[in-house]
């Protein structure tokens, strides 16, 4: 289907495996620059209860049959397929008021998030369907009763209600961790820009990469959908605080304890350091960052800088620099390549922002930009929702309210002066919890005081200075690996944050029992579980033959003083504890000279390794190495090596094997404990 050729067109919802048009003609959605209709939206008649059931019964089981690595591969294929079609998304994105640079954040930023989760899932998660959370908890002295926390996918549907400002990224940043967790989603984009989300979902469906039921789309109102959510479902919301609070207290959500994640209004602050006087690199970087955050997406960003907190002595120079920079921002129809800032999403949205500027004016005076009379370089000034950047100044921010309370969701910021670092922190905190703050300083003491003061009130804090300037991702960019969300007014939710985001769609359960049964449930051998020693050396077995619990008990080796001295001189590690009997005795931990920890690890390898070429391809490290009992000359070492976890790699001839390595002395005391990590071929040559 050629979407562009059919404009304006009726958007459809994708539910129950079909594209469904609303029963009514629908509300027109207008191009933000020209006012021309782009699409009509309506979801009347969609059976939302059936859509939830379809996700739970069809999408969920299909996703849960896949391992984390298979789901990660699916995200990668999807990201690549969407990237191939990106120009089609860019073309339609112009209608939302986005410039090419704005659309890049939304489209390629969104696809990049998918790809990033694909790669993180492959690298950071095991190739299993269940995740282990933390270490084994020993619950009995004799080791017959232990516990392990696990995470397993919720068996419901994730309902994602998104904001109008990022129709692609807003969907993909939530979808990636949801699908990786093994949970299907119903996406409800904000109506104003839903045509772009709908186009992307059409392309996703056409690829047939996702299992049926894994992704459904609602274009228009969600009707009675929330009445039918249950305890295994999750609802996420991005948008205004008022709608978020209403949905959070929805009867079904409260009664069924449905997980609810909210990301709402946020009056993010940027603090200029007391050291960052005009003429410093930090001052210039700060000016650039504030101007950029005000104008990217015409300031319609949840992370945009709304409050500019600057030393009183630098405020005048700062306003002057910002006024000059903002004055150069070419405002107009983003179809024109010379345009640097597009219109707001709609005329209604512009009226809303103008009203909020009037609220802010109770506390602050406008020092740059005229909200009522846009000066544009191209486009239709009557039909387009154009608004020049507006900078305000509040001289007494400590006693003002509106500037800390009113979110004008557009190219609007307020400069507020401070005198001490403590005062800067206090002003930032008056936002009552935000997604992000930034601090521009080259003074470590200022950074420490301000960042630690801001941290409890923010989900992310970025420090800007001359060193990171070139590589910095900036104040306003949420990143897949970093937490996005904030306390208090920002909604109290958390998204992204790498694998943390995946766990939001999984249930954590403490499993208690005998080690052998815990091992059967988790797929990971743990101390005390049954093991099979005495057969073929486990290094002779391919992945196809190796089993969790296959074990090797080695011969013994006695450590001599000669061994210790030889190792010391050979490696150059002649630390006194190995070489000087008297000094070693004076050490509170030792009773005379001891063997090097790395000598113990080396002797252990000498005891457990099978030298001939075979399925074991390489040793790629050790995890959790601990030396627990000193080894003196004359002590005798023995190793128990047990296959702990097997991770076959998708699309490769090998996989990873984790071995539990327990080195003991002649009394049976553990002298060293660690995991040995190896690459092993899937089959024998
Ligand atoms: P809304 O809160 O009105 O809408 C957000 C989402 O919720 C949209 O998808 C909307 O759908 C949906 N929605 C609205 N009412 C309901 C309901 N009763 N049940 C289920 N879903 C519902 O925010 P807007 O997107 O209209 O933006 C308004 C303001 O919110 C902005 O001016 C800005 O101040 C703030 N905002 C803040 C953001 C942030 O992250 N900080 C992001 C975006 C907006 P529909 O569009 O179909 O009504």
Image: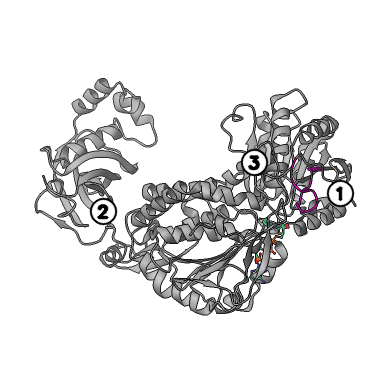
Q: Where's the C terminus, which quadrant?
A: top left
Q: Does residue 482 appear in the picture of this structure?
A: no
Q: Is residue 203 above or below residue 14?
A: above
Q: Work out whether mark 1 precedes mark 3 in sequence or the reverse, and give the earlier one.
A: 1
361 left or right of 139?
Answer: right
Quadrant position of residue 209: bottom left
Q: CA distance from mark 1 to mark 3?
A: 29 Å
Ligand 1 appears in which quadrant?
bottom right
Checking the image for residue 191, the label placed there is none
Specify whether residue 388 is painted magenta.
yes
Q: CA distance from mark 2 to mark 3?
A: 43 Å
Residue 586: x %, y % from top left? 38, 30
Q: CA distance from mark 2 to mark 1?
A: 68 Å
Residue 683: x %, y % from top left? 15, 49
User: Residue beneath label 3, please?
Assistant: 475
**Dot 2: few (<14), some (14–19), or many (≥20) neighbours within 10 Å?**
many
Q: Nearer the viewer, mark 2 or mark 3?
A: 3
Q: Nearer the viewer, mark 1 or mark 3?
A: 1
Q: Is residue 359 above or below residue 584?
A: below
Q: How many marks?
A: 3
Q: Is residue 17 above or below residue 580?
A: below
Residue 32: x %, y % from top left? 70, 53
User: Residue beneath label 1, please?
Assistant: 372
Magenta span main SS: loop
């Amino acid at each position: 289907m050629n979407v562009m050729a059919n404009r304006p067109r009726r958007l459809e919802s994708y539910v129950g495996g079909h594209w469904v048009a609303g029963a009514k003609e629908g509300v027109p959605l207008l191009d933000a620059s020209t006012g021309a209709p782009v699409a009509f939206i309506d979801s009347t008649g969609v059976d939302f209860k059936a859509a939830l059931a379809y996700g739970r019964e069809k999408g969920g089981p299909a996703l849960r049959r896949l391992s984390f690595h298979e789901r990660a591969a699916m995200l990668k294929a999807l990201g690549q397929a969407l990237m191939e079609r990106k120009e089609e998304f860019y073309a339609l994105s112009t209608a939302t008021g986005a410039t090419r640079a704005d659309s890049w954040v939304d489209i390629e930023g969104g696809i990049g998030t998918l790809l990033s989760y694909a790669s993180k899932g492959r690298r950071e998660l095991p190739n299993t369907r269940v995740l282990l959370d933390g270490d084994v908890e020993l619950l009995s002295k004799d080791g017959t009763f232990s516990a392990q926390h696990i995470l397993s996918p919720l068996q419901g549907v994730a309902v994602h209600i998104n904001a109008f400002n990022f129709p692609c990224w807003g969907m993909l940043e939530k979808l990636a961790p949801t699908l990786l967790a093994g949970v299907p989603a119903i996406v409800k984009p904000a109506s104003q820009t839903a045509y772009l989300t709908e186009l992307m979902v059409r392309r996703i469906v056409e690829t047939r990469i996702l299992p049926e039921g894994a992704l459904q789309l609602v274009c228009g109102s969600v009707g009675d959908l929330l009445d039918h959510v249950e305890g295994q479902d999750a609802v996420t919301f991005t948008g205004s605080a008022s709608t978020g609070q209403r949905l959070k207290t929805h009867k079904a959500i409260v009664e069924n304890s449905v997980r609810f994640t909210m990301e709402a209004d946020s009056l993010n602050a940027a603090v200029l350091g007391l050291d960052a006087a005009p003429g410093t690199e930090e001052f210039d970087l700060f000016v650039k960052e504030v101007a950029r955050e005000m104008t990217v997406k015409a300031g319609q960003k949840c992370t945009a800088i709304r409050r500019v907190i600057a030393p009183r002595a630098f405020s005048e120079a700062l306003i002057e620099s910002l006024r000059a920079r903002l004055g150069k921002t070419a405002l107009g129809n983003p179809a024109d390549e010379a345009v640097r800032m597009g219109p707001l999403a709609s005329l209604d949205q512009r009226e809303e922002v103008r009203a909020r500027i009037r609220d802010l004016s109770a506390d602050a005076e406008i020092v740059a930009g005229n909200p009522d009379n846009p000066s544009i370089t191209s486009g239709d000034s009557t039909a387009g929702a154009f608004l020049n950047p507006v900078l305000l100044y509040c001289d007494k921010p400590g006693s003002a309210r509106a500037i800390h309370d009113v979110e004008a969701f557009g190219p609007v910021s307020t400069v507020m002066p401070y005198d001490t670092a403590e005062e800067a922190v206090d002003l930032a905190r008056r936002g009552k919890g935000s997604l992000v703050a930034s601090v521009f300083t080259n003074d470590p003491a200022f950074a420490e005081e301000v960042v630690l003061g801001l941290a409890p009130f923010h989900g992310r804090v970025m420090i800007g200075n001359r060193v990171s300037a070139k590589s910095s991702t900036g104040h306003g960019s949420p990143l897949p690996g970093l937490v996005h969300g904030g306390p208090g007014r920002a909604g109290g939710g958390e998204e992204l944050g790498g694998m943390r985001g995946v766990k939001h769609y999984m249930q954590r359960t403490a499993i208690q029992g005998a080690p052998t049964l815990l091992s059967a449930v988790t797929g990971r051998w743990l101390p005390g579980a049954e093991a099979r020693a005495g057969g073929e050396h486990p290094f002779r077995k391919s992945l196809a033959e190796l089993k969790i619990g296959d074990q090797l008990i080695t011969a013994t080796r006695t450590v001599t003083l000669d061994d210790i001295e030889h190792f010391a001189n050979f490696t150059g590690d002649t630390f006194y504890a190995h070489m000087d009997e008297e000094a070693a005795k004076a050490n509170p931990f030792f009773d005379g000279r001891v063997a090097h920890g790395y000598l113990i690890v080396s002797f252990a390898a000498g005891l457990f390794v099978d030298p001939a070429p075979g399925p074991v391809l390489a040793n790629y490290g050790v995890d959790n190495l601990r030396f627990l009992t000193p080894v003196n000359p004359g002590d005798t070492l023995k190793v128990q090596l047990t296959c702990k976890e097997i991770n076959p790699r998708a699309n490769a001839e090998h996989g990873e094997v984790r071995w539990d390595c327990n080195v003991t002395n002649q009394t049976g005391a553990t002298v060293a404990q660690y995991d040995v990590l190896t690459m092993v071929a899937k089959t024998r040559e």
